[in-house]
Image: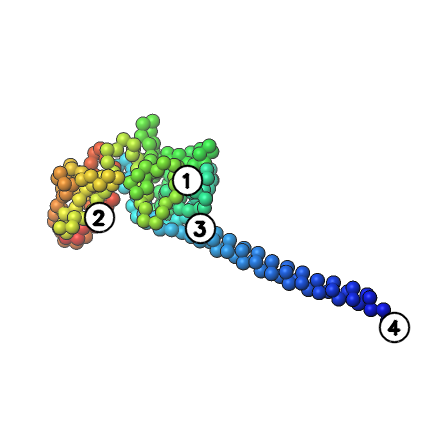
Amino acid sequence: MPDNSMQSDVAPNQGGIKAMKGRNLTIMLVFAAFALSLIAASAASAATVPIKLRIEGATRTIFEGTVKTEGHEVTTVSGGTHKCDGTNLGANPTPGPTPTAALDAAAAKSGFTWDGTWFGSFEDFGVERIADTSQTETEFWAVLVSYQFSSVGGCQQEVKPKEEVLWAWNAFEAAHFLKLKKAKHSTNTVVVTDGATGQPIEGATVGPVNNAPGAATNAQGEATLTFNTPGKHRVKAERSDSIRSNSLVIKS
């Protein structure tokens, strides 16, 4: 009779190989799905986000508008190239848009330059110049998010949707950070408040951009504007001891 012992030994082994192949295929599919999820998460974290940004220099508004940005590497003449995505110094677990990244995006969009020194111990830039406004021995640039001073650097702070970024020169000496809005009871009346506290600001001048004469606010922070020509007029509020306001468009 033929000896089938070798055949009986081979058959189970072939079945084991098939089972192993099946398990390996399953594992490969699981890892592939995991890798795709990481790629999708990475793409989502790197998506550009619209940031409302304003830069107030010593004598003028350098930039006011919306920029689209994400956390990215930033390069300055004095500081070199470094990441600036909110994960600096472990401030946030995942990358996101930051005030300094928004500043860098605005510079690229509008054609001005800025400079800052890199501090390795903080993994952040110290902003020293934006456009034609440089820090001095007593006057410095500072960053605020939704009218509050950032407690960390501009590459560590992540900006959330609907938050506003303000880079302001000599901000630490400012009495108020002016915020301008339209009054509810009149189309030509505006209200000036402190952006951080909501306090009405008296004695601010509201007028057309470029420091043209305007109307002064009363104790309620209100000013009624009149214009010699009809149309749309862009106005801002200023007071000598405060950071000038956002702009508004008034139609007359």
Q: How many marks?
A: 4
Q: Is residue 40 left or right of residue 192?
A: right
Secondary structure under badge 1? loop
Q: Earlier in the sequence, mark 3 or mark 1?
A: 3
Amino acid on which the number 3 mark rests in the picture:
Ser
Q: Where is residue 42 drawn, in percent x and y?
A: 48, 52
Q: Residue at x 45, y 44 (%)?
A: 93
Query: In the rendered image, which residue does mark 3 sit on?
Result: 45
Q: Where is residue 5 drawn, in percent x and y?
A: 82, 66
Q: Are marks 2 and 3 in contact (CB under 8 Å)?
A: no
Of marks 1 and 2, the one in the foreground? 1
Secondary structure under badge 3? helix
Query: In the rendered image, which residue does mark 2 sit on?
Result: 248
Q: Are marks 3 and 1 in contact (CB under 8 Å)?
A: no
Few, some or many residues within 10 Å of mark 4 (<14, 14–19, 20+): few
Q: Earlier in the sequence, mark 1 or mark 2?
A: 1
Few, some or many residues within 10 Å of mark 1 (<14, 14–19, 20+): many
Q: Residue at x 33, y 29 (%)?
A: 136
Amino acid on which the number 2 mark rests in the picture:
Leu
Query: In the rendered image, which residue does mark 1 sit on?
Result: 156
Tell me where residue 77 sits by quadrant: top left
The foreground one among 79 and 188 is: 188
The foreground one among 65 and 231 is: 65
Using the numbered discs, state the Cα–Cα distance from disc 2 to disc 3 in whole angstroms. Answer: 33 Å
Q: Is residue 119 left or right of residue 112?
A: right
Using the numbered discs, state the Cα–Cα distance from disc 4 to disc 2 in whole angstroms. Answer: 102 Å
In the image, is residue 6 above or below residue 110? below
Using the numbered discs, state the Cα–Cα distance from disc 4 to disc 3 in whole angstroms. Answer: 71 Å
Tell which residue pokes out farthest to the right in this image: 1
Q: Residue at x 35, y 51 (%)?
A: 50
Q: Earlier in the sequence, mark 1 or mark 4?
A: 4
Q: Is residue 12 visible?
A: yes
